Image (spheres, rainbow, N blue to C red):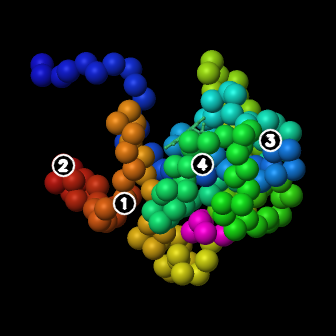
Amino acid sequence: MNEVKIGNNPFVYPMPMVLVGTVVNDRANFMAVGWVSRVNFNPPMIAVALGKFHYTNAGIHKNETFSVNIPGIDLMEKVDYCGLVSGEKTDKSTIFDVFYGDLSAAPMIRECPLCMECKLFNAVDLPSNTLFIGEIIETYTEERYLTDGKPDIKKMNPVTLTMPDNNYWRVGENAGKAWSIGNNFRKQSE
Ligand SMILES: Cc1cc2nc3c(=O)[nH]c(=O)nc-3n(C[C@H](O)[C@H](O)[C@H](O)COP(=O)(O)O)c2cc1C
């Protein structure tokens, strides 16, 4: 056996970087988040795991709404900044061109290729984090990010993150068709 033990870190490789938006004290606020996942098929839900004491959390608890915005790599410095400073001390409401959709307290970012507005479904209290689960009410994008009506990862050019080395990465080349390429192996093995 050649396996090496490297501890119990949650190695999810890579993670998509997003900006979580909400209104706190009557002001739009955005925080950088790497701990994000789709969690329910129908209705569509997404979850973000936020350390319990972030400024953002108070806004989500109060409004019961938040947004999940997917930035392109061109926004990397601004994204990182939103993860370095807190809305408690620094006004982050003017960094981006903000717009609102159907929900009044889910600020979204025009510069982001894709923005989802969410209604809070549940806030799960974990030992150090709160897992905010949101039902996606609507998604906003622009025609230029779509191919055949679907978001095109090459056009969106999202930012990904690895931890614990703490690096941002671009998305690479297409490697194969999901729910399909396994049929090659199926043919050989059956
Ligand atoms: C790359 C990166 C990823 C981050 N991911 C998360 C995360 O998933 N969950 C979290 O609670 N904080 C995360 N943070 C930290 C928050 O973004 C940071 O504490 C931010 O200042 C909180 O903003 P707020 O105080 O305005 O709510 C991340 C920071 C960076 C730079």
Q: Quadrant of ligand 1?
A: top right
Q: Residue at x 86, y 39 (%)?
A: 62
Residue 91 in sight: yes
Residue identifier under label 3: 59
Dominant SS type (magenta)? loop
Q: Quadrant of the N terminus?
A: top left
Residue identifier under label 1: 171
Taking the view exactly as shown, the residue that stands out farthest to the left is 1
Question: Which element type, helix, strand or loop, lies under badge 2?
Answer: helix
Q: Residue at x 25, y 18 (%)?
A: 5
3D distance between C-alphas at marks 3 and 2: 53 Å
Question: Which element type, helix, strand or loop, lies under badge 1?
Answer: loop
Q: Residue at x 79, y 64 (%)?
A: 100
Where residue 23 appears, x then y in whole percent? 80, 49
Mark 4, ligand 1, within 8 Å: the answer is: yes
Q: Identify residue type, mark 1.
A: Val
Q: Is residue 98 above or below residue 130?
A: below
Q: Identify residue type, mark 4.
A: Cys
Q: Nearer the viewer, residue 120 or 75?
A: 75
Q: Which mark is residue 82?
A: 4
For the record, the magenta segment spans 109-114
